[in-house]
Structures are given as C-alpha cells and as structure tokens.
Image (tube, rainbow, N blue to C red):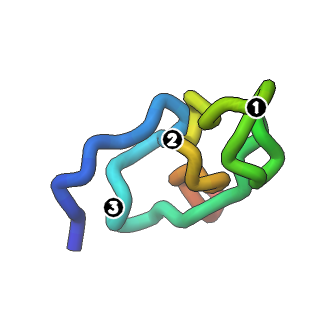
Amino acid sequence: MATTTPPNPGDQAVPGTPGTGEAVCDSCKGTGTTNGKQCPMCGGTGKVIEGIGGG
C-alpha cells in the first residue's frame, strides 16, 4: 500500500509502490549526509526507492 509521503529527489517512486524497493543512496553512500549536511537526494535516510526486477 502506497503512503502519502512525498518522494525525495533520489526516489524513482513513492515508497510502497509495487515493483519498487529500498536501495542505498548513491549520493551519500547510505550515510544520510553529504558535506556535513542532510543529503538532499535521500532526505537524510541513506536510502532511496528504486524500481526492482528486469523488464
């Protein structure tokens, strides 16, 4: 079930979208910070939502 949480810039879909899953943020490498500040790509979570599987 999809949530109403707005996606972060690094997300490919809204969390909970079928066919997606969490992945480590490429920008901050999962730390949640870049240059001592909250990562703008993942919103500080260290994770992004990406499509999974092939196709």
Q: Residue at x 23, y 64 (%)?
A: 2
Image height check: is 8 above or below 19? above
Q: Earlier in the sequence, mark 2 or mark 3?
A: 3
Visible residue check, residue 50? no
User: Are the residues tagged 2 and 3 within 8 Å (C-beta)?
Assistant: no
Q: Quote the CA–CA distance across marks 1 and 3.
A: 31 Å
Give the residue at the far bottom of this rendering: 1
Residue 47 at x, y percent in the picture: 62, 55
* Mark 1 vs 3, N-terminal side: 3
The kind of residue on which mark 1 rests is Gly
Q: Amino acid at mark 3?
A: Thr
Q: Which mark is residue 36?
A: 1
Q: Few, some or many C-alpha atoms within 10 Å of disc 2 (few <14, some 14-19, many ≥20)?
A: some
Q: Residue 17 — which label?
A: 3
Labels 1 and 3 touching (C-beta < 8 A): no
x, y (%) of residue 27? Answer: 75, 34
Name the residue located 51 percent from the left edge and 41 percent from the top edge: 43
In the picture, measured across the screen, residue 14 lies left or right of residue 9, that is left
